[in-house]
Image (tube, rainbow, N blue to C red):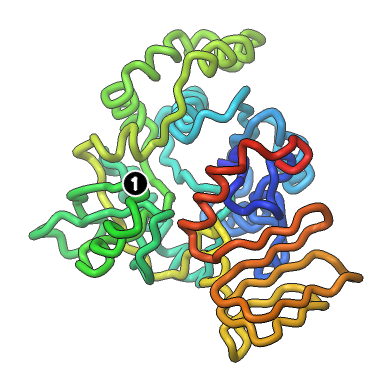
Amino acid sequence: MAGGAGRRFWPVSRERLPKQFITIREMGTSFLRHTFDRFSKVVPADHILVITTRRYVQYVKEHLPELSDENLIVEPAIRDTAPSLTYATYKLMLRDPEATVIVTPSDHLLRDMRPFVYTLRHALDYASKHDELIVLGTVPTRPDPNFGYIQKAPGSPEDTPPFKVKTFTEKPDAALAKIFVDSGEFLWNAGIFIWNVKTIREEIEECMPLLASLFEGWQDVFGTAGEKRFIEKVYGGAERQSISYGILEKTHRARVYPVRFRWDDIGEWQTYYDMVEEKDPAGNVIKGSLVNPGDSKNCLMVTTSRDKMMAIQGLDDFMIIDTDDVLLICPKDAEAYKRFIAAVGHKLPEKYK
């Protein structure tokens, strides 16, 4: 999935160049390229499909020149993951009605390749034989309200994963996230799903009948000249909805596979700060060659300039992000940043969005 606008990483990511197409030093490639290369170790590269919006098609082709046109699914608008995955599911039904599928965002950072590959291959094998929906879950390291949380069903008799799910909670507030983490009963929803197309189609039509009704007649249209007009009509009537809200919080078929590889959804700056292991003695993360932190501590300082110094004095737990045309100074915690984006994000002049 590579169609999101990536606003939570503003001002480095923008609507015109969202997060999945930018490069961070820790990877050396863009998020999209990193994701493609990672999953090509699990499935053949020509079995990888990318779904994005029209605005970003050229970026996808630039970052993945080997991707064939038949493996690129283009949405007419952003409607969140439920419409995206419904569209992709029906497209896959035409290609292989027996397919088993991994669904992944394009903007995550995963390390420890050996356990990652083992986990995905095991989950694929399981999903090919069982009519269930598997979600990867990671052990939380902090009460982060930007992630979804999964509670494993108590008393499950299984000795090996995946385990039955008791509850899904999509992005709780900070207080509830702390309760979840303190309980030790919850995993982070890594946003990576494994299922066979027959099962997810049944759940789409059971849990989201209104959305499924918009796609009625897809069998006769997909793969023809009429597909573009058909999908524009579908998306014109589709509401924004995530697959977690639409299906995973309702279904009885969900199972969670706890994973042991390191996973980071670098969805906003606080998460990036937490992920970077190289901090100075005062706890600062500094990215840029001309940065003087003074006596500041626990700050994130990022500059893309090579000829302008960033000089900071006396700040604690702030982020300072300096690009060619925007300077952002904001408390580093995720809630403060979210409040800022909610308050002023829609008011920004178009060139800064």
The quarter in which the C terminus is drawn is top right
- How far across and how far down the image is residue 331, in percent? 55, 65
Direction from residue 338 to residue 205 in the image, left or right: left
Indicate whether 289 appears above or below 217.
below
Visible in this render: residue 157?
Answer: yes
- Using the image as rendered, state which of residue 350 and residue 250 is in the foreground: 350
Vertical arrangement, residue 89 with respect to residue 290, above or below = above
The quadrant holding residue 249 is top left
Viewer-side residue, 175 vs 14 = 175
Whether residue 99 sits left or right of residue 59 in the image: it is left
- Residue wearing tag 1: 170
Q: Residue at x 38, y 18 (%)?
A: 212
Q: Position of residue 109 (x, y in %)?
A: 55, 62
Task: Determine whether 178 is above or below 95 in the image.
Answer: below
**Which residue corresponds to the image point at 32% horizontal and 18% vertical from the top-left?**
209
Pick the residue in front: 105 or 88. 105
In the rendered image, the vertical position of residue 32 relative to residue 213, given as above or below: below
| Residue 2 or residue 305, whichever sits in front | 305
Residue at 77% x, 77% y is 311
x, y percent for residue 296:
63, 82
Q: Residue furthest right?
A: 307
Quarter of the image that includes the N terminus: top right
Splitting the image into 4 quarters, where does residue 287 fall? bottom right
Q: Tell me which amino acid carries mark 1.
A: Glu
Taking the spot 69% from the left edge, 80% from the top edge, the residue there is: 313
